[in-house]
Amino acid sequence: MKSCVFNLVRAWKNIKQSTLQNCWKKLLKDEEVEFDFDGFENDDLCAHLRLAGEHHVCSNDISEWLEVDDGDPGYQILSEAEIAASVQNQGDDEELEDEDNDDDDEASNFKG
C-alpha cells in the first residue's frame, strides 16, 4: 500500500501544469446545448393521474388547470400610494407584535 501511494505522488509530480490546463479545455466544450422540450401532452398527464388513482380526471380538466393562470402575472401591481401605505402599516404591525410579546411575557411570569 505504501509503495502505491509513493507511485501516485511521483506520477502526480510528473504532470505538467500545461497538461492540466489543456485537459480542461477538452472537457469543457463551448458548445451550446439546445433543449427541444415542447411540454407535456395532456393525455400523458391524464394517464399518469389514472395510474395514481385519479380516474375522474380527463384531458379537458388538465387543460383548464394549466390555463387558469394565463392572465395572472404572479405578482400584485401596486401604486406608489399603496406601497407607501403597506410599508407604514407594516411598521404599525411590528409595534403591535412587540406589545403582544410584552403581554405574553407578563402572563408567563404571573403564577396564580
Image: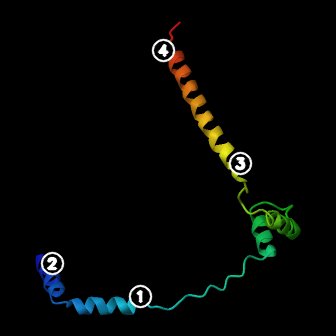
Give the distance between the C-alpha atoms of the residues marked 3 and 4, in whole angstroms: 43 Å
Disc 3 marks a residue whose amino acid type is: Ala
Left or right of 7 on screen, residue 44:
right
Quadrant of residue 36 within the rendered picture: bottom right
- Earlier along the polypeptide chain: callout 2 or callout 1? 2
Task: Give the mark toward the camera: 2 or 3.
Answer: 3
Q: Assess disc 2: are there few (<14), some (14-19) or many (≥20) residues with their C-alpha within 10 Å of its C-alpha.
A: few
**For mark 1, what is the residue?**
28
**For mark 4, what is the residue?**
109
Q: Position of residue 53 (x, y in %)?
A: 78, 60
Quadrant of residue 50 within the rendered picture: bottom right
Q: Quadrant of the N terminus?
A: bottom left
Give the distance between the C-alpha atoms of the residues marked 4 and 1, in whole angstroms: 64 Å
Asked whether 56 or 31 is in front, the reply is 31
Give the distance between the C-alpha atoms of the residues marked 2 and 3, in whole angstroms: 71 Å
Identify the residue at image location x=72%, y=60%: 74
**For mark 2, what is the residue?**
5
Residue 81 numbered tag? 3
Disc 1 marks a residue whose amino acid type is: Leu
Disc 2 marks a residue whose amino acid type is: Val
Identify the residue at image location x=36%, y=91%: 25
Asked whether 52 or 13 is in front, the reply is 13
- Earlier along the polypeptide chain: callout 2 or callout 4? 2
Give the distance between the C-alpha atoms of the residues marked 2 and 1, in whole angstroms: 29 Å
